[in-house]
Amino acid sequence: MEGLLRCSANYVPLTPTSFLERAASVYGDKTSIIYGDTRYTWRQTHERCLKLASALTRLKISRGDIVAAMAPNVPALYELHFAVPMAGATLSALNVSLDEHALTIILNRLQPKIIFVDSEFAHLVSKVINDKNNTHPQENHHDHKPLLVTIHAVSPDRQTQCDVEVREYEQTLATGESDFQAVIPADECDPISVNFTSGSTGMPKAVAYSHRAAYLNSLGLILRYEMGKLPVFLWTVDMFRCNGWCFVWAMAALGGINVCIRNVSAKIIFESIQLHKVTHFCGKPTILNMIAESPPADQKPLPSAVDVIIAGPFPTTCILKRVQELGFNIIHGYGMTEALGPALIGPWRSSQHHHHDRDDADANDDHNLKCREGLHNITLEAADVKDPTTMRSVPSDGETIGELMLQGNTLMAGYLGDLEATQEAFSGGWFRTGDVGVRHTDGCIEMKDRARDVIVFGKEVISTLDIEAVLLSHPKVEEAAVVAQNDVVAGQIPCAYVKLKEGRCSNAEEIVEFCTERLQKAAMVPKSVCFGDLPMNSTGKVQKSVLRERANAMGKLCP
């Protein structure tokens, strides 16, 4: 149409770093960060981030460079989420649970120019950098070693165990200028961060987020979780997980308070809520177990209701109800690294509140009911269950299995350095999650399992998650995982691996009987049960590929 013009007056590339500049102006004197006795205002946080960005440019950091960080939820890691992109570079926050092998692979992939590392992990990082045997020849390895900048978040005078020359975080920040002009991305689709998948189904993938997606998803969080004015966010979710599910940037947009904690426990959660009037926190489902099973002395009364957002398979209904009784509002999210965290969310309500709304609801099927509860995301254009071959939507009958696919503005830009994998993930114009599910008559989606984890019993597709939910409801079971075991007659049958709670004893017959009484179909009952620790990868995910190999190398019933 004639007479229209896109120019600097009406178009500025979207970037969540702009939230910080606004926060400094609108909420300048309000508290931005609390970490023990340390407190900053939004004006101070803005100034510190500008100085750090300035210091990074003096260290020759610019567009296209990657800066890595390995630290728990401390103020420095929060600041790096703004300072690194304000210098024009891309941040990669690394999982602090990585072992030497996994860290080697990731650093070889990233080739960061600078690594910010908490003093607790400095020795590990320096060891990986100095070990020539850790260099993979297939990677594009540079001759120079990255500069290490240590973060002393425990004690300023703590001795850093490191074998290479390093700089210190506060000293590095002090070399920058507070009047630095933050770099605005030339293209809002440029990468702002790189996050790694857990690697539970294979090698970890380097997932790149764009400035645009991060900006929109941050605003989407505010709407999805109804965060309101000046929230107080307790950092129980790791900032290295999808950039803290983008709450690092959302909190700046709202001018709220970030309560940073180095370790997570029920005692710390309750104390933080009382002391700082926390309104929101989020993380893995184990947080709910931690709260429900904490000593009564730690369960301090809540000043007001607190929203807790959980992503992943829910714990048992009794755990959920106990947490709800303590005053927490539970919100369930489904997502993944490629979707910048939880993409679909819905509130959890006890089954008696809405069994009358659904004719197909089973009074014992509380877990699935919660997974079906209203899934909404204003920044995600579409979520559908499709036949992965024909790309047609499956019938809304609650039975036909399909792959969950997403489409919208808050998905990854792609897999760093792997165009083929990116094209495969986006083939057909949708993001293929690799998760399977069904669509119900009311339009809601029920997740079943990872596509590669489902059990194909004859012509029937069985969800391992449904079986695991029952196993975890056993009073003696601490952890459980179910995998497919090859069978001559049925094709595949369920094989269960169980870790018992400390001091508890059980046997395969007891577990099988427990499942038989609670699972809807005989085909779902595990035909093999093994006891012991579950194999975990460096990020704490169960390695089901290992369990499948074990299952197919043994007989039907383990002692």
Image: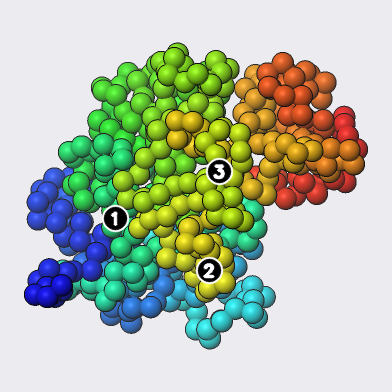
Disc on the earlier residue, 1 or 3: 1
Instruction: Let me know if residue 247 appears in the view.
Output: yes
Q: Residue at (76%, 24%) from the top-left corner?
A: 522
**On the rendered structure, is 130 left or right of 76?**
right
Disc on the earlier residue, 2 or 1: 1
Place of residue 437 in the rendered image (x, y in percent of width and height, measured from the top left) = 57, 40
**Is disc 1 surrounded by few (<14), some (14 to 19) or many (20+) residues within 10 Å?**
many
Q: Is residue 207 shown above or below 518?
A: below
**Residue beneath disc 1:** 216
Q: Secondary structure at mark 1?
A: helix
What is the basis of the colouring in this image?
rainbow
Q: What distance separates the C-alpha of mark 1 from that of mark 3?
A: 29 Å
**On the rendered structure, is 522 left or right of 353?**
right
The mark lying in front, picked from 3 and 2, is 3
Disc on the earlier residue, 3 or 2: 3
**Is disc 2 surrounded by few (<14), some (14 to 19) or many (20+) residues within 10 Å?**
some
The mark lying in front, picked from 1 and 3, is 3
Where does the C terminus fall, quadrant-wise? top right
Q: Amino acid at mark 3?
A: Val
Q: Is residue 316 shown above or below 34?
A: above
**Residue beneath disc 2:** 423
**On the rendered structure, is 55 left or right of 201?**
left
Q: Is residue 365 shown above or below 216?
A: above
Q: Amino acid at mark 2?
A: Gln
Q: Secondary structure at mark 3?
A: loop
Q: Nearer the viewer, residue 455 or 118?
A: 455
Q: What distance separates the C-alpha of mark 2 from that of mark 1?
A: 23 Å
**Residue beneath disc 3:** 394
Residue with the most extreme bottom position = 143
Q: Are marks 3 and 2 in contact (CB under 8 Å)?
A: no
Where does the N terminus fall, quadrant-wise? bottom left
Instruction: Let me know if residue 175 appears in the view.
Output: no
